[in-house]
Amino acid sequence: MYVEEFRAPGALTAEFAEELAVSAAGYSSRITLSAHEHAVNLPVLPWCWAELGIRAGTRVTITAEGGHRPPDLEDRQALDALVGRFRALTGA
């Protein structure tokens, strides 16, 4: 499992949640986004994003695990891509 924790540069919106879910679709890793003691798997983020309450400065944790193309490496790549995409979307 790979984990990255950081402060959100801005708010997570419905549009951003949809974009994150779509960008994760190419990975076999199980990707989870957590904030305020709630966790959501990326495929359902477009329906559950509001429960996370992510605004500027919110502590966000993203995890990636179980990827198999190739094992271990995919989790690191997925985590790096999703954290970068999250920051780009919410920091604009």
Image (cartoon, grey):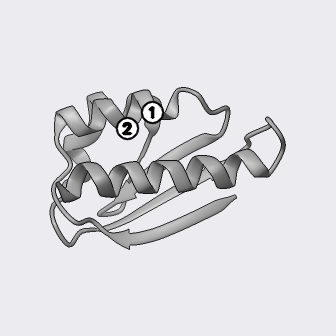
Residue 42's label in the rendered image is: none
Q: Please, is residue 75 above or below residue 57 in the view?
A: above
Identify whether 75 is placed above or below 59: above
Q: Residues within 10 Å of mark 1 (few under 14, many from 20)?
A: some
What amino acid does circle 1 point to?
Answer: Ser
Can you tell which quarter of the image residue 46 is in? Answer: top left
| Type of amino acid under label 2 | Leu
* Residue at disc 2, secondary structure: helix
Mark 1 falls on what kind of element?
Answer: helix
Residue at which label 2 appears? 20
What number is the disc on residue 23? 1
The residue at 83%/40% (across/down) is 70
x and y percentages locating residue 4 in the rendered image? 51, 67
Write the residue at 40% across / 56% down: 34
How far apart marks 2 and 1 lie (CA) works out to 5 Å
Q: Is residue 13 left or right of residue 19?
A: left
Labelled pair 2, 1 in contact (Cβ < 8 Å): yes
- Seen from the viewer's position, the closer of residues 52 and 83 is 83
Is 72 placed left or right of 59 in the picture? right
In which quadrant is the N terminus drawn? bottom right
Residue 48 vertical position relative to residue 73 in the rendered view, above or below: above
Q: Where is residue 55 in the image (x, y as percent from the top left)?
A: 15, 61
Q: Which of 44 and 88 is in front in this view?
A: 88
